[in-house]
Structure formats: structure tokens, C-alpha cells
Image (cartoon, rainbow, N blue to C red):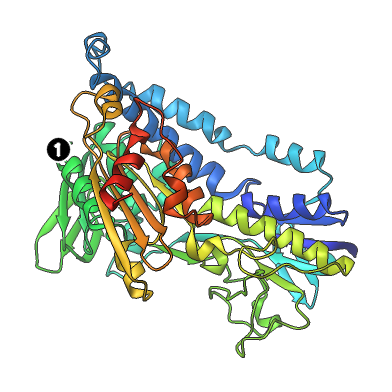
Amino acid sequence: MSAYDVIVIGAGPVGENVADRVVQGGLTAAIVERELVGGECSYWACMPTKALLRSGAALRAARQVPGAREAVTGELDVAAVLRRRDSFASNWQDDAQVSWLESVGVPLYRGHGRIASDRVVAVTGADGTTTTLTARHAVVVATGSGALVPDIEGLREAKPWTSRETVAAESVPARLAVIGGGVVASEMATAFSELGSSVTMLARDGVLHLHEPFVGEQVAESLRDKGVSVRAGAEAGSVERNADGTVVITLTDGERIEADELLVAIGRTPNTQDIGLETAGLKPGAWLTVDDTMRVLGEGGAPVGDGWLYAAGDVNRRVLLTHQGKYQARAVGDIIVARAKGEPVDDAPWGRHAATADERAVPQVVFTDPEIASVGLTAAQAEAAGLRIRVVDHDLAATAGSALHAEGYRGHARMVVDEDREVIVGFTLAGPDVAEMLHAATIAVAGEVPLDRLWHAVPAFPTVSEVWLRLLEAYGR
């Protein structure tokens, strides 16, 4: 038996940050991982997906600027794109991540971790041997989430791709069908259409329907321009894979669609099926409910046991984004240290130990064409929250910076203002390269900067950021 102050189950970005923060605070920590150290983001999500998308975006950007356009004479080199993707996934080897854990003093236990009892984690290695770890203060579940495969007749037997298989594909299928219309579905439809696939997108609820309405409209239009068949409202009724490998999707209206591969991207499910939750009185396979300091709550809403169990990242379902999970991880690590040392706990809204931004200021970028960058609430969400709001829209192309950035620049900006406090509660941008403009909006929302003060934040000319001035002018400032 080995004892540590904190044991972290899951060595993705969230788990790594929890362990690092704990050690920086003067405690000891061990981390358990059954797959690759670095987790989903490093090998099957954030990094390799953006590598797949970046080459196409760079080519589009060059073609939108006269002078550069004439220098571009070829199409994407698919093999080179895939090689670059492989490099950003570290060729699915985690040596560098393991070395980093060693450098910060966090022991790694490879194997499947299960909670055996209060503060006790049993780790079963590949050879079947079990190591028992004991935590003096806390156990943190950071096991993340996996792709949700729905109960559609024949779907599992047809062996569809999830985000993992799609991102790690060794070749580009001639025909790719996609079930879903969210972020993964939209990004992969963008990437594979630009890599040469004929893509059919079955978006039952529409494209990016959780964003502002103009977002889905612009992305769907762009996908269609690339040759993607975007089928809003279409729903798969059954799936089969023929002997020759062809996938046949039969829609609920009887139409049949054929493809060489099928990507299912309709959501996520928590990786909590076999981690011993039942020993803590929790339901295996369920999302974990937490308070603002990420302590896991039981059925009655009280912390499990004496508060020894925490959950950070996707597994608590607050926000399924890597950067937000790392934000939670910093709060978790700090509060475990504070509680262990008997130091004051700052868990009030926006306090050091509270993940307040999860509810009010979550930034997100969707790397489609156009790029989508958003933070905070949509207009619909703000109204549902009971806020008295004003929505201000602006054509992102109507600035000098946009005209310089690209020929025929197209984009849109929306600012959602809480009229009672005169602060921005939501901000959405659609257009080329808007991701790099997002942090200014994130600061405005998280900092609750009054509009009167934002007027003094003068955007440099000529940049696309001049949209801030235009939005304030439209609001009446």
C-alpha cells in the first residue's frame, strides 16, 4: 500500500493540472491512467483535430488575398496534412507527457483505477496485478468522457467511427456520412470535405443549434459551398455495413444513403462506468454532480462522506471543454491544499476556489469556415435566465481591418447586454480568424466591465477588432 495526500484518477490535461497544482501547494500526489498520459485532448481531440483543420484554413486564407492567391497553384497535400496531424498527436506516444509528470514529482500508476473504499484506489495493471493507493486528503476523478453511440438499429454492429477513429484516420474515405450537427460533426465535415471526401451531414437538430442562429446559418451555407450535403432535420432509423464495407444509412423517412465510413458525433457520455462509484454510494456510469469547489455530491445534495471525493473536467458535465476543465483543475488543486492545511476557503462567486466562469463566461471556438468564437450567454439563454437584455449586431465585414484581412471578408458579430447592469453577458463572432479576438470579449464578460469603461478601450486601427467600437456606437455609447 502506498499513501499520498491526493490521488487523481485520469491523466488527461485536467488530471495533470490537479496533480501539478497540489504538488505546487506542498502536498504529495499520485496519478492513475489506463490509456495515454495526456488524455483525449492530446491524441484524439483538441490538438490533432485543429492540425487537420489548419491546413485547409491556411489555404483558404491565401486564396482570399490578391497577390497571395496567384501564388497558390495546387490543392492540399493530404499525406502531408495527415503527417502533420500525427506529429501533433505525438504519434500516439506519451513519452513526453510521462517525462513531464516525473519532472514535477508526480508518480504515475499505469492501469485501471477503481475506488475501493473511502480514500482508497485500487489500480489493476495490464499484467493483472493490483496496487492499492491511499489518499490522506482527497481522491479526484478526472476520467473525462467518451463518444455517445445512440441506440440506432444496427449502428454498433456497423462499427461506425467516433471522434477518435475520425481524427486518427490513416486515409480519407471517398464518401463520409456524419450523424450530428454539433461542434465535432461540423469541424470534421469541414476538414474531410477539404481533404477530398464527399460528405453527407445528417443534422437532425440543425447545424450548431446551441449557438446564436446566425452561426448555424453561416456554417451550413459554407459547408454546402464546399459540396457537403447538409440534411437539416434528417434522422437515421437504421444502419448496416455490407460485405463490401459500404455503410447504408436508412433515414426515418425511408431514404437510403451510402457511404464508405460513418462518423457518429451526437454527444458525450461520462467515463464512470467502472471506477468504483458504487462504493461511495453513487451510480456507475453517471455524470458526477459537484458544488462550485468540485466536491462530489451524493443523492441528498451533501458532499460524499466527509468531502474527500472531487470530480473535475468533462466528468462533472459542467462544461465539456478542455480549457474549462483545466480551469476547474486549478481551483480543485488549490482548495484541496487549503482544506488540508486549514487555510481560508474562498468559494464565493469569482473567488479563487470557485469555478464561477463555468456558468457565466465560458469561451469556445469552433474551427469551421467561418470560424466561430463565443463567450457567455446567447440571447436566448440570457432571456431564459430572466435578464433584461439588448442585442446589438454588426456586419463584421464593415470595418477597414476586415477589408484588409481578406478580399470579400464575410462575418458577423453579436453583443448581448444586460440592460440593468450595463455589462456584456454574451458575445459571438463568426468570420475568418476571429478566434484570436475572443479573449478580449472573455475579459469583458468575466470582468463585468461596464460599457462606459469599455468605451475607453480603444481598438487599434486598422484591425478587425474595430468591431468593438462599432458595437458600442450602435448601442449608443
Residue 439 visible in the picture: yes
Answer with left or right where residue 93 lies relative to residue 59: right
Give me the residue at 61% from left, 68% from top: 349
Give me the residue at 38% from left, 24% from top: 79
Q: Which residue is mark 1?
A: 225
Judge whether 299 appears above or below 318 on screen.
Answer: below
> In which quadrant of the rendered image does the N terminus lie?
bottom right
Answer with left or right where residue 370 lies relative to residue 283: left
Answer with left or right where residue 385 lies relative to residue 448: left
Other residues around mark 1 within 10 Å, as few (<14) / some (14–19) / many (≥20): few
Q: Secondary structure at mark 1?
A: helix
Front residue of this view, candidates 389 and 285: 389
Q: Quadrant of residue 19?
A: bottom right
Front residue of this view, candidates 295 and 12: 295
Give me the residue at 24% from left, 25% from top: 403
Give the image location of residue 397, x and y in percent: 22, 34
Give the image location of residue 270, x and y in percent: 52, 67
Q: Quadrant of residue 28?
A: bottom right
Give the image location of residue 447, x and y in percent: 54, 54
Q: Quadrant of residue 310?
A: bottom right
- Which three-letter amino acid code belongs to the residue tagged 1? Asp
Judge whether 144 appears above or below 367 on screen.
Answer: below
Judge whether 59 appears above or below 47 on screen.
Answer: above
Front residue of this view, candidates 127 and 279: 279
Residue 130 visible in the picture: no
Give the image location of residue 151, x and y in percent: 33, 71
